[in-house]
Amino acid sequence: MSDTGVALTRKDFESDQEVRWCPGCGDYGILAAIQFVLPELGVKPEEMVFVSGIGCAARLPYYMNTYGMHGIHGRAPAIATGVALTRPDLHVWVIGGDGDMLSIGGNHLIHALRRNVNLKILMLNNQIYGLTKGQYSPTSEIGKVTKSTPFGSIDHPFNPVSLALGTEAGFVARTHDMDRKHMMETFRRAHEHRGAAFVEVYQNCNVFNDGAFAGILKRDVRADMLIELKHGERIIFGTDGQLGITLNEFGEPSVCNVADVGADKLLVHDEHRADPTLAFALSRLADAPNVPTPVGVFRDVERPIYEVEVQRQLAAASQRSGPGDLAELLATGSTWTVGES
């Protein structure tokens, strides 16, 4: 609700800027999902900040009628960390692509997640550098032929969800640009989580990597190829619910036919498990988007929030030693005067 008591709508979050992505780009659907869900969150546009780095996805802050910043390549999580530390009253979202966040910005991403800064990080994964016209990215599959890999990529790709779980991020999820309802629900869950929330969004680049996710997202295969994770429910999927997930003798999840093992043997998804090991194992079910792939929330646990801990430490230090003096601090220790030569 606004200050006048009038319910907010999508238009309240739309800027006056012309949206400029390639016709048919998956970014349009993701932008719409964000603008549709924000009015439902009870947050006013002036209470939100969108921060981005460089890339096609990084244009998104221009199209939001909120505060925003288009930063430099890969540094969006670092910039957003500064915003969250100084203005913890704001809702800070980070938007980036797989190249931006996992290549030059990989360092900033993993540390924002492990510190548990209160950021909502949406990583739009199209497995290609689109803005610079089609080089392979850190998520491109082995053998990917691009302008920069004419004989096929030999780099082993990142699994972004596995990477985020490896940092022990408190909230880790995956969604895709073909399902607005699923995106909106996932973004709402990320907003409600207190602490760092990482969401991988499969996004089609219809110019430089068209159909990269068609093997799991086309309507005629989706039921058999997408595994929807739902907390507290047995993991079951397939057109007729004929497929499921069990744990083998090594504790590793694997796809099975329900008729072969029985429904009571299926794994029950628990997104609140403190230990991320099982969530990590689920993320390893699919090492490429051409085999059954889990989507939804992998992990949702509470951890100490970075900016809260910083403020607590500062308050304790001020109580113990006084408010301090920055000029005095800078002059502490060895100092010298540089003379004229």
Image (cartoon, helix red, strand yellow):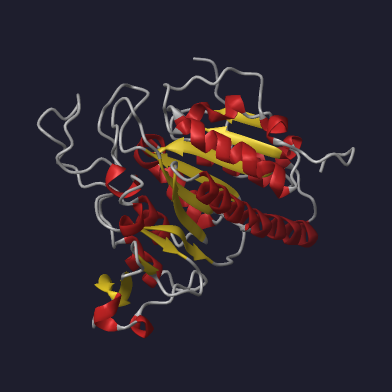
Vertically, is 124 above or below 301? above
Name the residue nearer the viewer: 248 or 250. 248
Which of the 4 image quarters holds residue 16?
top right
Which of the 4 image quarters holds residue 90?
top right
Image point (43%, 33%), residue name: 26
Q: Is residue 317 visible?
A: yes
How many numbered markers are drawn?
0
Image point (40%, 35%), residue name: 100
Quarter occupied by the N terminus: top right
Q: Is residue 334 visible?
A: no
Vertically, is 311 above or below 121? below
> Quick one: which residue is furthest to the left in this view?
151
Name the residue nearer the viewer: 214 or 333. 214
Which of the 4 image quarters holds residue 33?
top right
Q: Position of residue 183 (x, y in %)?
A: 52, 47
> Quick one: which residue is furthest to the front in this view?
240
Q: Position of residue 166 (x, y in %)?
A: 38, 60
Q: Relative to residue 260, is residue 199 drawn left or right?
A: right
Q: Position of residue 225 (x, y in %)?
A: 31, 56
Q: Relative to residue 186, is residue 277 drawn left or right?
A: left
Vertically, is 317 above or below 71? below
Name the residue nearer the viewer: 125 or 117. 125
Image point (73%, 31%), residue name: 12
> Quick one: which residue is furthest to the right in this view?
4
